Image (cartoon, rainbow, N blue to C red):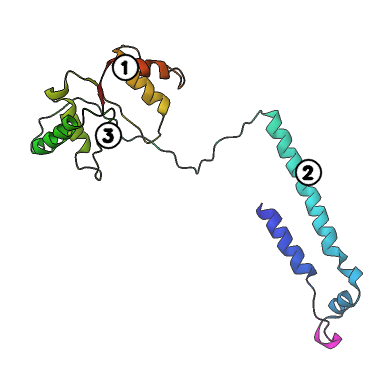
Amino acid sequence: MYVVSDMIDEFEADTQPITQPSPRKCSFKKYLAIMIPCLTIGPKITVANRMEKMREDLEEITDQHKKFNLTKGTNASEPKLTDIRETSSIMETQIVGRTDDKNDILASLSESMTQDITILPINGIGGLGKTTLAKMVYNSSQFKEYSQVWVYVSQTFDLKNIGNSIITQLSEKEKESEYTKIQMIHPFKSFLLVRRFLLY
């Protein structure tokens, strides 16, 4: 790409129009080149030869590409999202000082249990303890009669993995479910008809 750009720049520099000067102010050769346009054909021939050489080089590269069965790869400069952590519902340590927050969430859930769907977000910047607070609610005895599901949503959102994780936990299977997005509809309907569950 840079070779083509350089070649075009050189061609423009060699062929750009020049105001006709007096023979006394320039060399005799340049004066003739200005007065006789056919003398400027040299740069055009040079560019044509270089373009032909570039075409041959590209054909050789294409032949090598086919010969070695090279495949087009991904752009190495594209940023890739990596999950730096994964959460679980297990309480690893004794938590102190979040009891009031936990009770507020439990009270809000209790008040909204008559609704078909309740969404209760826990917002805040990283490190405030949002996941820890959700674990405290999850492990509370207040809603143990409900089916509870703990789902980890990674930076790369995958609806199929999330759905299979929910179905696996609700069906209490040891093996992870492998449903397609269409196949998930039936088990989800079955669960919703007979159960109330909390999704974290």
Q: Residue tagged by mark 3?
A: 119
Determine the secondary structure under disc 2: helix
Task: Nearest to the eye among marks 2 and 1: give it.
Answer: 1
Residue 193 — which label? 1
| Disc 3 residue type (three-letter) | Ile
How far across and down, in percent of the image, does residue 180 sit?
46, 19
The vertical placement of 132 against 40, above or below, is: above
Residue depicted at x 22% and y 26%: 89
The vertical placement of 1 against 58, above or below, is: below
Residue 150 — which label? none
Q: Residue furthest front?
A: 114
Task: Nearest to the eye among marks 3 and 1: give it.
Answer: 1
How far across and down, in percent of the image, does residue 82 sit?
38, 36
Q: Distance between the residues labelled 3 and 1?
A: 19 Å
The vertical placement of 4 against 120, above or below, is: below
How far across and down, in percent of the image, does residue 23 sit?
86, 85
Query: Relative to the observer, which residue lies in front, 89 or 16?
Result: 89
Query: Is tag 3's residue or tag 1's residue first in the polypeptide sequence?
Result: 3
| Disc 1 residue type (three-letter) | Leu
| Disc 2 residue type (three-letter) | Glu
Determine the secondary structure under disc 3: loop
Q: In which quarter of the image is residue 92?
A: top left
Query: Is tag 3's residue or tag 2's residue first in the polypeptide sequence?
Result: 2
Q: How crowded is mark 3: few (under 14 residues within 10 Å), some or many (20 or more)?
A: few
Say whether marks 2 and 1 touch (CB < 8 Å).
no
Q: Residue tagged by mark 2?
A: 56
Q: In which quarter of the image is residue 84?
A: top left
Q: Quadrant of the C terminus?
A: top left
Q: Does 16 appear in magenta?
A: no
